[in-house]
Image: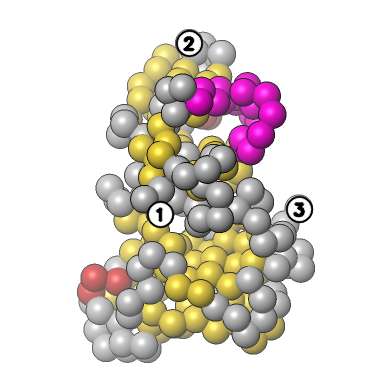
Amino acid sequence: AQSVAQPEDQVNVAEGNPLTVKCTYSVSGNPYLFWYVQYPNRGLQFLLKYITGDNLVKGSYGFEAEFNKSQTSFHLKKPSALVSDSALYFCPGAGTASKLTFGTGTRLQVTL
Amino acid sequence: DVKVTQSSRYLVKRTGEKVFLECVQDMDHENMFWYRQDPGLGLRLIYFSYDVKMKEKGDIPEGYSVSREKKERFSLILESASTNQTSMYLCASSLQRSVGEKLFFGSGTQLSVL
């Protein structure tokens, strides 16, 4: 069965510090991996995706994610967090010929 | 930019009522999706559609049906609402039929069934 896991319900980081939001996947075939962000009372917004190519994917708002095949991970990173990055982050994934599966999300809290 | 509009932001209904949730996208996208979002469960796919008058079941279709009479509109129907259908409902669309396409989401409808 296809699955993605976000092992942390919440991540806390101080503004200006680097942030990492973790995601691991288990899919058949080549993985399709995404990151979406949900701000309060809003729908989800696309940040970035990995299909093939470079393992380091750059996305919106200064975020990037690193695809690691050996660790089956696709962690989201940003060098310097902002308070405005505080939101709920989702890492959906899919394998070849399968539907997108969402995890439970990770709440990022950035404080001054 | 693509706009996905859900007709209601908040909705309160009674048990047993028939409920319609409407979703419209303005960018001629082929695919449309309905998800529900619950704390601790993330997003779960209810139904999706790759074409007009076409529908496919997602992971949790029980208690729901859908209608896609026009390309831009995808409706979610709760035939007889129950309290366990209280949830945030999110509509999404994507340009083409590929799992690699990014999704564009509406702002969501928070449905409460009393």
In percent of the image, x 31 and y 31: which residue is there? A7
* Dot 1 amino acid type: Leu
Residue for point 24% across, 84% down:
B15
Q: Is residue B57 left or right of residue B105?
A: left
Q: Amino acid at mark 3?
A: Asp
Q: For the magenta stretch, what is the residue range?
A: A49-69
Mark 3 / mark 1, whichever is N-terminal: 3
Query: Horizontally, is A87 left or right of B39 in the view?
Result: right
Q: Position of residue A50 (x, y in %)?
A: 61, 35
Q: CA distance from mark 3 to mark 2?
A: 32 Å
Q: Which mark is residue A35?
A: none
Asked if one can make out residue A17 in the rendered structure from this viewpoint, the answer is: yes
What is the chain identity of the residue bearing mark 1? B
- What is the x, y in percent for residue A85? 51, 29
For the residues labelled 1 and 2, say whether their Cβ atoms are less than 8 Å apart. Answer: no
Above or below for B72 versus B27: below
Q: Is residue A48 visible?
A: no
- Mark 1 vs mark 2, CA separation in Å: 29 Å
Which one is in front, B50 or B28? B50
Instruction: Identify the disc placed on residue A17.
Output: 2
For mark 3, what is the residue?
B1
Residue assigned mark 1:
B43
Is B13 drawn above or below residue B30 in the view shown? below
User: Label 2: few (<14), some or many (≥20) within 10 Å?
Assistant: few
Residue at (63, 22) in percent of width and height? A56
Which quarter of the picture shows residue B22?
bottom right
* Image height of B80 relative to A95, above or below: below
Both on one chain, marks 1 and 2? Answer: no
Residue B89 sits in quarter: bottom left
Rounded to the nearest angstrom, the CA distance separating label 3 from label 1 is 24 Å
